[in-house]
Amino acid sequence: MEIGFIGLGNMGAPMARNLAAAGHRVTGFDVSGAAVEGVAKAASAAEAATGREAVITMLPSGAILGSVYAEIVPAAAPGTLMLDCSTVDVASARDAATAATSAGLEPVDAPVSGGTGGASAGTLTFMAGGSEAGFARAVPLFEVMGARSVHCGGPGAGQAAKICNNMVLGISMIGVCEAFALAGKLGLDAAALYEVISTSSGQCWSVTTYCPVPGVGPESPADRDYRPGFAAELMLKDLGLAREAAAASDAATPLGTHAAELYDAFVAGGGRGQDFSAMLPWLAKQGRD
Ligand code: NAD
């Protein structure tokens, strides 16, 4: 397939590389001038979008997505599959979908989970919003870049699912960090607490797969001095999107709001660049010794 790929950063570059390695003809563009092995370089986003069967975007924010779509929607051929894999706010995703549909294109929002490791290994999970036909056309691309895809509903549904999932993750990670910080103050062995929680009703991904305590549970960023993994500022971004979505839809998300405030304080207080599970040593320092 002829594919345009716009946004060749930490996630986009390995995704584009995997598509090229699978035999697709990929033409990429990034404002940074980044080049990717096996991917032809376009001089502009419009050039990357011209004459392709699918155009994939992997960009930092809804505002940037909007400005890129203003350029590529008029350039893309009628019927082009417009697959946006960025994590953005639901309103920007719906605006992009409306612009694409009005121009006779086929939009699908499909944010991912799995991080840079999943992008390199081709094991991402895609959460998709768009028409049945658009989703069906995107599946062969999802199968190259990922291991799983879920059609969540119409335009914006993929972003809505991503935002809700990551709100649960942010809240659960803070809860797990609080429990291990409290356990430390109570003189309880972290490995013993892990054995209990991971087989009891407090069990969750933040304990069993991604335990924030070094040396406890399967290997995780805690064992690598909290190098990301999933950076704290990206969690803060996603909790901000959840907050915006809750305000716009009049949903009560008090713990989501509190989680955003805690990640805001953590990132401002030295957490930027650390994994989001480094909330544990930061929280442990907050209490009195
Ligand atoms: P990144 O900052 O490494 O990459 C974004 C790229 O977009 C950069 O290379 C930048 O130069 C490029 N860009 C910015 N403006 C542009 C424009 N106008 N035209 C063309 N290129 C432009 O970010 P990333 O980690 O690759 O994340 C990309 C998206 O994926 C974000 O929405 C992020 O929230 C989401 N995401 C990231 C992760 C992760 O672990 N990194 C996990 C899941 C989802």
Image (tube, grey):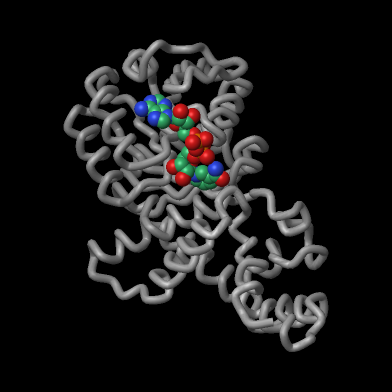
The part of the image, by quadrant, that contains residue 281 is bottom right
Q: Which is nearer the eye, 189 or 249? A: 189
**Going 35% across and 40% down the picture, which residue do you hit?**
108
Q: Position of residue 166 (x, y in %)?
A: 48, 60
**Going 50% across and 52% down the picture, which residue do you hit?**
233
Left or right: where 236 falls relative to 10: left
Looking at the rendered structure, the number of numbered marks drawn on it comes to: 0
Q: Which is nearer the eye, 140 or 37? A: 37
For the C terminus, the image quarter is bottom right
Farthest residue toward the left?
Answer: 102
Left or right: where 102 falls relative to 3: left
Q: Position of residue 43 (x, y in %)?
A: 40, 11
The part of the image, by quadrant, that contains residue 253 is bottom left
One can see residue 254 in this view: yes
Q: Is residue 161 above or below residue 3?
A: below
Left or right: where 239 falls relative to 77: right
Q: Is residue 208 above or below residue 52?
A: below
**Going 62% across and 80% down the picture, which residue do you hit?**
287
Q: Is residue 10 above or below residue 164?
A: above
Left or right: where 49 falls relative to 177: left
One can see residue 56 in this view: no
Q: Position of residue 74 (x, y in %)?
A: 22, 21
Q: Position of residue 218 (x, y in %)?
A: 78, 61
Q: Which is nearer the eye, 168 or 226? A: 226
Q: Is residue 211 above or below residue 89?
A: below
Farthest residue toward the bottom?
Answer: 186
**Going 64% across and 82% down the picture, which residue do you hit?**
288
